[in-house]
Image: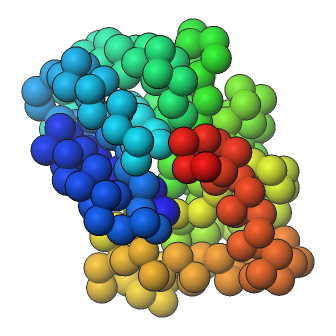
Amino acid sequence: MVAVGVDLEHSRRVVDLAHRFPQVFAGVGHYPTETPDPDIAALRELAADERVVAIGEVGLDFVDTNSPSREVQQARFDQLLTLAVELDLPVSIHNRGAPAEVAGAIAAHPGLRGAMHYFALEWDWAERFLGLGFYLSFAGLVTRPSRNALREVVKQCPPDRILLETDSPYGQAHKRMGEPNRPAYLLDTARLVAELRGISLEELADIERANALALFRKMT
Ligand SMILES: [Zn+2]
C-alpha cells in the first residue's frame, strides 16, 4: 500500500511508516487546500528516500471554500508536477471541481505518469484521463447506491489502468458510513469491483499487484 502525505510533516511521517512496515510505501506531497506554499526543496530531498514511490497527494480543489485561490493552487500544482517529472516519480492527483484544469496541467508536463486518486467522475472524463496515460483509482464511493455512473466506469476501465484505494480515514464504503475508514476495508471495494468486472477476488489481486508495480516503479 501507499500512504500519502498532505504536507511536509505528514510526508515525513509516512516515510517513517514506510521504513517500519515492509507492506507500506510512501508518497510525499502537498494538499491543494494547505495554506503555506509547498517546500519543493524539502520534498525533493524526502523523495530521494528508497521507500518513496510517488509524489502525492497533489492536485486542485476548487470546491473547498477555504482553499487558496485557483491561481495559487495552479502555480503550486505546476511546481509539484515539474518535480515529479524531474524525479521520474508518478503522481497521485486530487481533483475536486477542476477536471479540465487538471487535465490541462497533466498535458503540459510531458512524461508525467500517475493516478487519478478517488476517481468519482463519469466515463467521458475517465476516457480523457486514460487518454493522458493515467490510472484510475477507485475507493469506497463505488459501493454507494447512487453511484451507478461510477460503477459503469469501473466496468469499462482497461484492466491495466485500474487501481484501488481507501482514502482512509475518509471514503467509507456504504456499509461503513459513520465509522472511520481504514486500509483493511479496501476489501469492501475490491469485492464489488471484482463482481462488477466478472472476475475473482484473487484475479483482481493479481491485476492490482501488477498495476501497482508498473506505476510505482520504486516498489520493485
Ligand atoms: Zn484527495
Residue 155's place in the image compared with 212, above or below, is below
Between 6 and 175, the one nearer to me in the picture: 6
Between 146 and 45, the one nearer to me in the picture: 45
Q: Position of residue 116 (x, y in %)?
A: 56, 43
Residue 83 visible in this rendered orientation of the protein: yes
Which residue is pictured at 54% across the width and 34% down the height?
Answer: 90
Between 176 and 80, the one nearer to me in the picture: 80
Give the number of callouts.
0
Q: Position of residue 23 (x, y in %)?
A: 46, 68
Q: Position of residue 134 (x, y in %)?
A: 67, 36
Which residue is pictured at 74% across the width and 57% down the height?
Answer: 210
Residue 104's place in the image compared with 119, above or below, is above
Locate residue 62 relative to residue 134 in the image: left or right.
Answer: left
Q: Position of residue 43 (x, y in %)?
A: 26, 28
Which residue is pictured at 35% across the width and 14% down the height?
Answer: 79
Residue 104 sits in quarter: top right
